[in-house]
Every structure is written in C-alpha cells, then in structure tokens.
Image: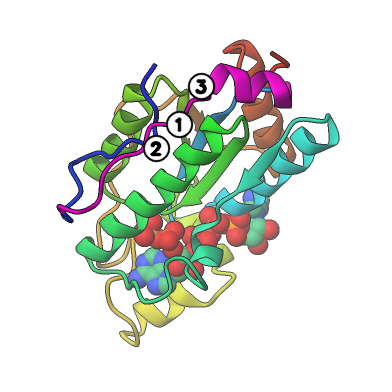
Amino acid sequence: MSDPRSPAAPSPHRDVVWHDGGLDRTARQEALGHAGATVWLTGLSGSGKSTVAFEVERRLVASGRPAYVLDGDNLRHGLNAGLGFSAEDRAENVRRVGEVALLLADAGVVALAPLVSPYRVDRARVRSRHESAALPFLEVHVATPLEECERRDPKGLYAKARAGEISGMTGIDDPWEPPEHPDLVLAAGSADDHAAAIVALLAERGIAARV
Ligand SMILES: Nc1ncnc2c1ncn2[C@@H]1O[C@H](COP(=O)(O)OS(=O)(=O)O)[C@@H](OP(=O)(O)O)[C@H]1O
Ligand SMILES: Nc1ncnc2c1ncn2[C@@H]1O[C@H](COP(=O)(O)OP(=O)(O)O)[C@@H](O)[C@H]1O
C-alpha cells in the first residue's frame, strides 16, 4: 500500500526531500482499533449535505468510531480562507479538502466532506488519490432538486442570485455536474434517513468496523 502522505507530484522545491516513516497504516489502525475512509457528499447549496454529514459524525462517534466533518463552509473560515468560487478556486478548495480527508482516513478516521464540489474532474481527482493509497472513498450524491434548495434557501443566497446581487451561484449561473457513478444517492427522506443510509453503506462495505 502506498503512503498517502507521499506527494501526488514531485515537490516543486528541489531542496525538499521526501522522508519515509517507519510505521505503516496497519500498525496505526491497530493501535486505534479502526480503519478509516472518506465519505464525500456533493450537492447543491441547501441540499442537506452538512446536516447529514454532522448526523453521521454524531452516530459514528456515539458508537465509538472516530469520525470528523470537513465542512466546506467551515473550512473556508480557515484552511481555505482566501479562496473564492471561480472554477480554479473551487478546484483548489476540493483538492485541499481531499488531501486532508486522505490524511484523516489514513489515520483511521471516517472523514466526512460535505462540499458543493460541482466539477466531476475535481471529485475524480480526489477519488483517484484515495484509490492510489488503497483507502476507501465513497461518493454520496445529495440529490435534492434545485427548486427545493431554493425553497429552503437558509442563507438567502438563491434569492440574491435571482435578484442579480451575486453571480456564480451554483445551480443558477454556475454549473453543478452530477456524479456518473455515485456510491449512494440520497433523494427524498429525512436527514435521519439519509444518515442511516450512509452508516448502513459503511457497514455493508466493511468500512469503519473495528480492525
Ligand atoms: N457562488 C456560490 N456558489 C455556491 N455556494 C456558495 C457561493 N457563494 C457562497 N456560497 C456558500 O459557500 C458554500 C459552498 O462552499 P464549498 O466549499 O462547499 O464550495 S465548492 O465545493 O468549492 O464549490 C455554500 O455552502 P452550503 O450551502 O453549505 O453548500 C454556500 O453557503
Ligand atoms: N433531508 C432533509 N429534509 C428536509 N430539510 C432538510 C434535510 N436536510 C437538511 N435540511 C434542511 O435544509 C437546509 C439546508 O441544509 P444544509 O445541511 O445546511 O445543506 P447544505 O450543507 O447542502 O447547504 C437546512 O435548513 C436543513 O435543516
């Protein structure tokens, strides 16, 4: 198994040399008692990604399994402060969160990443990084229709976009590309139903069980 901390590409700094550690993933996960995974939730703003991710985190932690939500909105207050919503910035946002998720999964945590992540190619890159590192990656499509997201509009963003006060709003004047082969699609149902479906999928795939 390759170490996910190893670089996706050679360092652009010629004086930076990769340092191999002596411990492998199995040893770390045995110490913790758990194997990790990444659950990536993609969908429109207001679709319910954060609500379901935090509910899955709550359920997993309550059952003694380490889990951690990497919320798109929240990380834009710190790690990703300074990134906007251009296609380039969204790609960088997704790349960074994907790398953090990979590290958490490697450490034995279930990383939950609710991000709009509108571009297939950006999500595919995160999947591919996990596959190269032999770490489970589950893509969950939170498939709430645009009309319902607009009806909820908890942050008033859709109203602003319709009024022309903001531009580049996903689903209005910016694209969102649905997954072609999602591991799970969450359509109608409560946030509790959706969380239960994700926990069931993790169990079905043998992920996040004690090692
Ligand atoms: N233009 C535009 N388009 C979409 N979303 C916008 C935009 N401007 C601000 N917001 C708010 O930012 C949240 C999305 O951040 P993400 O980091 O998940 O976005 S992305 O993955 O980089 O596309 C998103 O949060 P959620 O509603 O939780 O999805 C919005 O609250
Ligand atoms: N399954 C659901 N059914 C109905 N309302 C929901 C559901 N999931 C979330 N909500 C509500 O929808 C709104 C947006 O949810 P949120 O989790 O913030 O979405 P996102 O993270 O995709 O922007 C919130 O008011 C939340 O309470």
The first of marks 1 and 2 along the sequence is 2
Q: Which mark is residue 5?
A: 2
Mark 3 packing: few (<14 Cα in 10 Å), some, or many (20+)?
few
Front residue of 207/201: it is 207
Residue 211 location, x and y as percent? 69, 13
Residue 41 within the segment the image draws in magenta: no
Mark 1 lies on a secondary structure that is: loop
Mark 2 lies on a secondary structure that is: loop
Q: Which residue: 33% across, 38% down? A: 126
Look at the magenta stretch and give its main secondary structure: loop
Q: Which amino acid, by three-letter code, is at mark 2?
A: Arg
Mark 3 lies on a secondary structure that is: loop
The answer to which image quadrant residue 91 occupies is: bottom left
Query: How far apart are labels 2 and 3 at the CA level?
Result: 11 Å
Is residue 108 visible to the viewer in this orientation of the structure? yes
Q: Which residue: 35% across, 23% down? A: 131
Span highlighted in magenta in the image: 14-33
Can you identify the residue that label 3 sits on? 24
Q: Which amino acid, by three-letter code, is at mark 3?
A: Asp
Can you identify the residue that label 1 sits on? 21
Residue 59 location, x and y as percent? 78, 36
